[in-house]
Image (cartoon, rainbow, N blue to C red):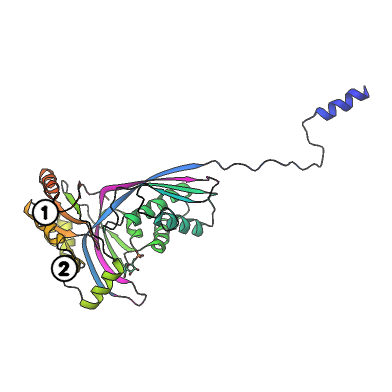
């Protein structure tokens, strides 16, 4: 009797009273988030002046376009952070704006994801004036905030501004007027239906800080008429929108790279309502109200630049 009782006690799975249960550490369950990052065009870009903090006050009419990168974030990998990008010439580490955006988010949130992997499939050209890196950074912030739900849109844009001047707009998206460093944003009417863009990417890239310095030295010679552009957008007047496209950086870039003017001439000859450099380049875009004409223009650009696309604007 007593032996049996002792054996029963030893077979019990209950811990002895007062014993401490030691379990193996829980493996984190990875969470996968997916997000799309759209490129942008500057329908206007004005440089108003240099600020005491070294940045410039800008005034820009911005438009998102359907040329996009795809991101996949894996949270809780249990491993060191990594960025894997299908373009080997872009940083695959903490130098990538995606990484900086994730760092900024987790610092602001006071959280540790227990490992992060960001896989990035690029379609937006780099060194193009289309805010490709900033769009990816914004996509990371959007994906993380959708998952954790910690910040208001305004607070998320503040985190974005720590990563780069174009990131707040990339979070905002669509048609917008951007002022200040680019973070003071207001919504603009969508472009009239049926408009599309041809994007041409010649093979050069310029240094944005160097171009700002050059503009400080020589002054702005191509100043957009921003109020006229806003009126044209309000009226939905496609021809006038085309006429009002303007970029303060274009004269300086076109002086160094004649291909800018050559591309503009082809786009205009093929029926563009207007054609301009976006950002500090090197993409030159044309605005079209006829998709067949746009495709013909993109094909006609082949001798001048290796890459051209026909894309639609992305609605607000
Ligand atoms: O903010 P972000 O790092 O994208 O800016 C890159 C560079 O562009 C800055 O170092 C600055 O030289 C210039 N810049 C500027 N004024 C702005 C935005 C950018 O002078 N509003």
Magenta region, main secondary structure: strand
Which residue sits at x=86%, y=26%?
A: 7
Q: Earlier in the sequence, mark 1 or mark 2?
A: 2
Which quadrant of the render holds ligand 1?
Answer: bottom left
Q: Where is the N terminus found, in terms of image quarters?
A: top right
Relative to residue 74, is residue 276 depicted above or below? below
From which residue to which does the magenta span run? 50-78
Q: Quadrant of residue 41?
A: bottom left
> Which residue position is annotated with label 1?
267
Picture coordinates of residue 250 (x, y %)?
18, 65
Residue closer to the observer: 291 or 81: 81
Residue 105 falls left or right of residue 38: right
Q: Is residue 183 above or below residue 137?
A: below
Secondary structure under tag 1 reads: helix
Neighbor class of circle 2 (other Cα within 10 Å; few <14, some 14-19, many 20+) is few
Disc 2 is placed on an element classified as helix
In the rendered image, residue 80, in percent from the top left (x then y), is placed at 52, 50
- Which mark is in front, 1 or 2? 2
Left or right of 44 on screen, residue 239: left
Q: Does any atom of ligand 1 lie closer than 8 Å to the CB of label 2?
A: no
Residue at 79% x, 36% y: name it. 15
Residue 73 on the magenta segment: yes
9 or 179: which is nearer to us?
A: 9
- Count every numbered label the image shows and give the total: 2
Which circle marks residue 255 in the picture? 2
In the rendering, at what x and y percent does residue 174 appear? 27, 53
Judge: label 1 CB < 8 Å from ligand 1. no
Residue contact at pointers 1 and 2, CB within 8 angstroms? no
Q: Is residue 33 above or below residue 285?
A: above
* Between 167 and 131, the one nearer to me in the picture: 131
**Is 59 inside the magenta-drawn segment?**
yes
Tag on residue 76? Answer: none
């Amino acid at each position: 009797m007593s032996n049996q009782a002792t054996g029963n006690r030893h077979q019990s799975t209950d811990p002895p009273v007062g014993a401490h249960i030691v379990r193996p550490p829980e493996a984190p369950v990875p969470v996968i988030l997916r997000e799309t990052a759209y490129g942008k065009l500057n329908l206007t870009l004005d440089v108003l002046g240099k600020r005491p903090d070294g940045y410039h006050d800008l005034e820009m009419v911005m438009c998102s376009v359907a040329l996009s990168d795809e991101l996949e974030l894996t949270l809780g990998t249990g491993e060191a952070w990594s960025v894997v990008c299908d373009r080997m010439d872009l940083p695959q580490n903490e130098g990538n704006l995606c990484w900086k955006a994730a760092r900024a988010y987790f610092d602001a949130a006071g959280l540790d994801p227990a490992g992060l992997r960001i896989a990035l499939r690029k379609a937006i050209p780099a060194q193009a004036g289309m805010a490709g890196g900033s769009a990816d950074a914004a996509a990371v912030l959007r994906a993380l905030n959708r998952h954790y739900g910690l910040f208001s849109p305004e607070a998320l844009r503040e985190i974005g501004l720590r990563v780069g001047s174009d990131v707040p707009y990339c979070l905002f998206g669509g048609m917008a007027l951007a002022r200040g460093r680019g973070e003071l944003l207001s919504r603009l009417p969508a472009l009239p239906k049926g408009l599309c863009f041809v994007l041409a990417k010649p093979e050069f890239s310029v240094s944005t800080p160097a171009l700002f310095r050059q503009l400080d030295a020589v002054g702005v010679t191509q100043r957009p008429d921003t109020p006229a552009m806003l009126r044209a957008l309000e009226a939905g007047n496609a021809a006038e929108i085309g006429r009002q496209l303007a970029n303060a950086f274009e004269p300086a870039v076109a002086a160094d790279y004649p291909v800018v003017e050559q591309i503009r001439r082809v786009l205009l000859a093929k029926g563009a309502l207007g054609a301009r450099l976006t950002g500090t380049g090197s993409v030159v875009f044309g605005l079209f109200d006829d998709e067949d004409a746009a495709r013909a223009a993109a094909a006609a650009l082949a001798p001048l630049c290796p890459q051209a696309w026909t894309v639609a604007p992305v609605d607000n």
